[in-house]
Image: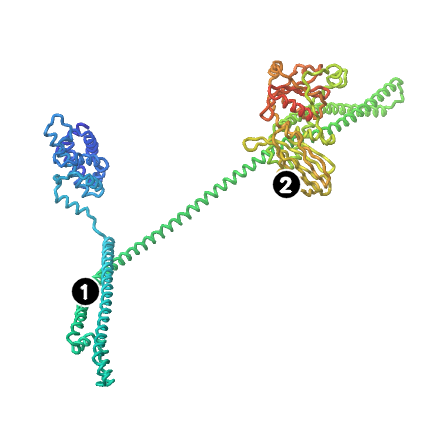
Amino acid sequence: MDQFIAQLSDKQKALDIVKAVENKQLNGVYYSQDVTDFFEAMKKIMKEKHPPKECLYGLKIVKDCIEKFNTDFRNKVKSELLELIYEVATFRIKDTDDSRGTTYFKNPEHEKQIEQYGASYIRLALDCIRVWALWFPDFKGYGQRLEKEQGYLPKINYFKQELINEHINKNQVSSTPHDDTGSIQNKIRQLNQQLINYLQSHTEVNSFLKDELEKINVQIEDLVVQEVQDQFLDEFVLTYPEFQSGKISYQEFRMQFLSSSQLKKGSQNILDESNMSQSINQASKVQKPLQQQQQYQSSYDQSYVLKNEQQNEIESLRNQLQAAQQECQRYSQTIQQNDKRTQELQQELQNCRVQIENLKNQRKEEQQSHDNTILKEYQQQIDHYKNLYELQLKQQNYEQQQPQYQQQAQQQSQIISQQQYDQQNQQIQNYQEEIENLRVSYNIVNEKLKIHEQKGNATFSEYDFMNLKKKYDELDSKYFILKQENHRLKQTNQEYGNQQANQSRISESFAREIDQKDENSNVVFFNFKENDLWQGTQNANQSQSLVNSRMRDVSELIYPHKTAAEYYRQNGKKQFKGTLINRSALQLQLNPANLLNYKKASLNQLATLFQSNKIEIKSRQQLTYGLNKQEFISTTISIKNKELKSIQLQIFNTNKNIWCNKETKSTLLQSQQTILYEFIREANVKLHELSLIKVSVSFENFILYLPSFLRNCIQYYHIEASTYKTMKKQFQGSIYATPLLPISCKTELKQLSEQGQLLNQWEQENEDLITESKYAFKAVLSNQLEFYLELIMTPCDEFLFRGFTSFDEETLQFVLNGLSNLYS
């Protein structure tokens, strides 16, 4: 770059750069690398203000290139160099000294050559800004900024005046007919405004003169009347004595006054008659008004002349207006021609728009047809996937129903197998009886043969012997066939026994899966139907029967006692440690059957809550969440009409803390019809320990208790047996216990025990020792109270709960009492 900067003062290098710019202008080729490097070099030296000679010669190269009128070069100068040139031009612009640029470059040695470079550099930059602002409109802003500086602007030296004027004329834009029309219209508007102003001013003058003339006429009339009156009086004074003395008649007197009255018609006649009839003294009186009249007449004549001049001027203005109107008409014709051309262009534009609109419509139709084709393809794919999805759903339904089908098939196969087994046993018995009969017959025949041989009866004929031999062979073959059939039936019976064992194992595994599904199922409350409620109850009853069938009958392990309970009462029953709680039993106005239903409904998500000869009520409970994750208990009851006639049903809910999802008004319930109600309660076990509502069935009232949700609010967690025993041993507080109570909900208590950790497993493994079962739990009540629970069950169908906590012992006693009431 330094080498290139040093070459800027070389004339040949300058010519090469100017030719490169000119070639771009003429041939349209791109700039050479020299032009690009030139701009970079100029920016560098102008910012650094060094070296002085290259700055001056570089700016001269810029000036020469600009004079080639290359638009791209000019734009590049404007964007990259013009601001720097303007800063150079405005250096000490307030000074009136032409040599103000001598101090622009650094010159510690005060060399005259550098001072001369600086002065020329400033003048050249100033001339460039001024001339370029005249040539190029986009440079005009810098010229205006330079004028606002109000500094010293010397004469332009670096540009010839002819060149400046030539390119100024070239850059002037020729006016269009539309611009001429606008200028003409502006001129017409100016002339009209001048004419209106002139007419308004002269109209005001004319109105003023008219008013003055009217005033003068009134004054003249007053003077004439006054003169006539004076003349009349004078004549009357002179004539009346003659009339009175009788010298003249009345007619003569009247004629004299008639002639005097005619003086009113013209001021000149009156003045002449008055001059002839009046005396010299009276003539002086009349002469004064005549002079005033002449003055008024002269002023009137002057105003009349002025008015004529104004009319002439108005006439000339009218002529000018007519000429302007003619010129306007000529320009209007030009405008009409332009409008006509504009209309033609608008028509062409409208045709183009119509064509474009047609093309758009055609494109839109093509696009729409293409979209329809794609949509059809997508629809076919969707139908295909839909069919696949339906097949998948059918397959899933088949897989879900397959266990039921297998169970039904197993039950049917069991029934059929049992029947076949009975038939086979009957056949075996029949075959065995026949074999026994044949054996007896065989023995009888042998004995007869022996008797005949012993007797040596000579009369024994050969025919009898052959018959007997034949009978013996038949019995022997029949015995062999029956023996084979008996062996085959034994094998079949053995296979059937193995099959029965396999089916029992499959049934047990399937029942365990059903129990696990029932325990882990989390049914969304708002999506279940009434049929699900009843079907779920039936499934629960079936699962309960399966669980009961799987329960271990420990009575088979006891000898010589008949039952485990009898053995436990005599040998193993003991007292359990713990502080007894203040137990309060459930005080419900229910019969024993419905009391048991209430407990089962409180322990199961889905169960029968109440039964009578008229209705049957089932309930379903689950935990729901409201705003801010607040817990609520949702209890849905389904009331079914069991009678053959319709009943009138009504629910009475007087609890403020229980909300129902529908109006509890009186409803007519048809036979076998079911209605659902949903009740929402806060998950506060103490607040809703006993929630009752009143039900009216055909005007017969009874109390219905909503199930307790204590079991739903307790979450159980796994804990190791060793951990529980260690914590219980180290616990310093009170361990609370319930009394030993009989088990009423045996299945539910068994399900609860399966969630805990067995503590005395070593005792259970000893089949000869029958003792109680102990299960440990870590439990949390409504995410608030954490406590540890122990369930103890004895072979006598008795149980008790023990628990301890480091927090709220009162709530723990409440929980233990509630659990004991539900399972006892």
Q: Position of residue 368 (x, y in %)?
A: 43, 46
Residue position for label 2: 663
Q: According to the image, label 1 marks what residue?
A: 306
Residue 2 in the image: state x and y as whole percent: 18, 27
Q: Amino acid at mark 2?
A: Glu
Q: Amino acid at mark 1?
A: Leu
Element at badge 2?
A: loop
Q: Is residue 724 above or below residue 664?
A: above
Locate residue 523: give its quadrant.
top right
Q: Quote the CA–CA distance across marks 2 and 1.
A: 106 Å
Q: Is residue 597 left or right of residue 434?
A: left
**What is the crowding at mark 2: few (fewer than 14 residues within 10 Å), some, or many (at least 20)?**
few
Q: Nearer the viewer, residue 104 or 823?
A: 104
Could you tell me if residue 502 is visible in this image? no
Above or below for 380 versus 743: below
Q: Quadrant of the rendered structure where residue 591 is?
A: top right
* Sequence-first tag of 2 and 1: 1
Indicate the quadrant containing the N terminus: top left, top right, bottom left or bottom right. top left
